[in-house]
Image (tube, rainbow, N blue to C red):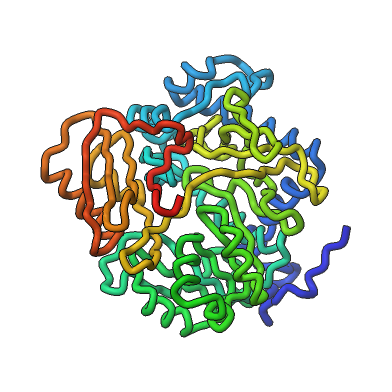
């Protein structure tokens, strides 16, 4: 083992000038946290699994102590050392909604603050949940740790795309902010540009992206594929993309091949808003994801196994080891995947492959162009309290919205849903909103919130 920081872009005054010190305290905390994560995720399997077992015991004890909902599911006992995780019931989105509605945050009064979040992921079941300040800190440091795992250049600029409602005439907003991954003043960091988009004008967006070198492009496949169709692959090279980190879905093979043809490497993370980082794509074995073992335990539901390219695959169940505000214990995230004890690259830790999640979140317009489409769970719940929804593009100019809610929605709410979809989709669509007692998902085990039936 060799640790060498000769390529780390240290700032000229990175180190403390106080006597008998090396690093400044704020940098030391982040560096220590990065080392913690690297030791757990890349260190010896037995040590890692012992740590995970202890964290699971802590989480189970906390959930049982603070929640009647969880006491009913996992029981009460002096020690949770002998509890087999696989013996506990899976946590569905409906279960999660019930726990949060009844009990709120499970953090003890006076402990660290929490925030309420909402998402539907790619599914049609919106949920609300709480996260602690530790979760936010972990997610930030974990993102920085990935730079060290992958050997990325920390001095690269970062351009981050985020799907979020905006009423800007161009369909997107741009802001330059401090790099959220920390270590400012310790290493030389590039600029951090954040682009929030709803229904972007691709001509205006491509012009904006040419203003500054993009560097590390953190973007969903739907926006990259829309830009590929509009501007062509050479645009990405000309705009200074050094690497594409795909979020929210696996990049298509055609998109990978296109960017690779101009020398731009492509990698991906597997994550969800409720849990954070679940896995990161192996640099040596594409489409295999090393599980983020400092954050999550991953199981495959053995009752739903099916053959996928010669490998058994089933529903992904996630246990978030740091989910003290809203516990996620055997949470059914709605994805299908294969789980392996190790990766073909030799990594001695769990790995996922054959991840089947969301379909292409792209709308097709009458002129043949494609545009990204995603409505966030928080926007859905802001209109009405619903149990599930499904949006489908069934014809070139037709979008069908199905809403299941506990009570009959008044016409004003139905129209509000129509306007919400129009805001994200743009003009030129007949948007049909129907309230139904229950959505017939058929064989769609993922229960996708949006499906483009013209591209499937």
Q: Is residue 389 above or below residue 165?
A: above
Q: Position of residue 167 (x, y in %)?
A: 26, 66
Q: Nearer the viewer, residue 117 or 413?
A: 413
Q: Is residue 72 above or below residue 134?
A: above
Q: Nearer the viewer, residue 320 or 35?
A: 320
Q: Is residue 381 above or below residue 263?
A: above
Q: Is residue 286 left or right of residue 435?
A: right
Q: Is residue 317 left or right of residue 349?
A: left
Q: Position of residue 43 (x, y in %)?
A: 79, 47
What residue is shown at x 39% (from left), y 29% (from top)?
94
Extreme-right residue of the structure: 1
What residue is shown at x 65% (from left), y 21% (from top)?
84
What residue is shown at x 16% (from left), y 44% (from top)?
413
Q: Is residue 285 above or below residue 297?
A: below
Q: Which quadrant of the view contains residue 419? A: bottom left
Q: Which quadrant of the view contains residue 142? A: bottom right
Q: Position of residue 259 (x, y in %)?
A: 61, 71
Q: Is residue 366 left or right of residue 132?
A: left
Q: Where does the N terminus fall, quadrant-wise? A: bottom right
Q: Which quadrant of the view contains residue 349? A: top right
- The answer to whether any part of residue 117 appears in the image is no
Q: Position of residue 2 (x, y in %)?
A: 87, 62
Extreme-left residue of the structure: 411
- The answer to whether any part of residue 408 appears in the image is yes
Q: Nearer the viewer, residue 321 or 149?
A: 149
What residue is shown at x 33% (from left), y 69% (from top)?
367
């Amino acid at each position: 083992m060799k640790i060498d920081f000769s390529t780390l872009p240290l700032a000229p005054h990175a180190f403390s000038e106080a006597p008998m010190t090396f690093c400044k305290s704020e940098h030391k905390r982040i560096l220590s946290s990065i080392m913690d994560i690297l030791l757990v995720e890349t260190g010896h399997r037995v040590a890692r699994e012992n740590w995970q077992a202890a964290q699971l015991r802590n989480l189970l004890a906390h959930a049982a102590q603070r929640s009647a909902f969880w006491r009913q599911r996992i029981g009460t006992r002096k020690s949770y050392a002998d509890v087999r995780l696989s013996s506990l019931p899976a946590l569905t989105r409906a279960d999660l909604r019930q726990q949060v509605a009844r009990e709120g945050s499970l953090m003890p009064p006076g402990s660290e603050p929490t925030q309420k979040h909402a998402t539907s992921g790619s599914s049609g079941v919106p949920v609300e949940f709480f996260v602690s300040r530790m979760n936010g800190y972990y997610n930030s440091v974990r993102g920085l740790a990935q730079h060290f795992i992958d050997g990325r250049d920390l001095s690269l600029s970062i351009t981050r795309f985020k799907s979020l409602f905006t009423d800007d005439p161009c369909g997107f907003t741009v802001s330059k902010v401090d790099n959220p991954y920390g270590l400012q003043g310790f290493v030389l960091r590039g600029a951090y540009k954040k682009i929030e988009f709803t229904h972007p004008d691709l001509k205006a967006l491509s012009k904006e992206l040419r203003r500054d070198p993009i560097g590390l492009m953190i973007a969903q496949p739907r926006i990259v594929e829309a830009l590929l169709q509009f501007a062509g692959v050479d645009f990405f090279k000309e705009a200074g993309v050094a690497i594409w980190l795909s979020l929210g879905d696996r990049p298509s093979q055609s998109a990978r091949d296109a960017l690779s043809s101009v020398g731009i490497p492509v990698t991906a993370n597997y994550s969800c808003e409720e849990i954070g980082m679940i896995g990161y794509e192996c640099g040596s074995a594409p489409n295999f994801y090393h599980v983020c073992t400092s954050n999550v335990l991953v199981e495959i539901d053995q009752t739903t196994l099916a053959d996928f390219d010669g490998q058994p695959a089933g529903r992904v169940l996630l246990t978030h080891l740091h989910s003290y505000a809203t516990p996620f214990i055997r949470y059914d995230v709605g994805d299908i995947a294969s789980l392996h004890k190790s990766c073909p690259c030799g990594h001695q830790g769990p790995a996922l492959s054959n991840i089947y999640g969301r379909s292409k979140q792209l709308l097709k317009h009458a002129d043949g162009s494609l545009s990204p489409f995603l409505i966030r769970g928080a926007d859905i719940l802001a209109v009405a309290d619903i149990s599930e929804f499904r949006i489908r593009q069934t014809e070139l100019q037709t979008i069908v919205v199905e809403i299941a809610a506990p009570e009959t929605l008044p016409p004003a709410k139905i129209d509000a849903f129509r306007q919400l979809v129009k805001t994200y989709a743009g003009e030129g669509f007949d948007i049909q909103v129907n309230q139904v007692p229950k959505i017939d998902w058929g064989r769609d085990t993922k229960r996708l919130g949006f499906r483009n039936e013209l591209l499937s």
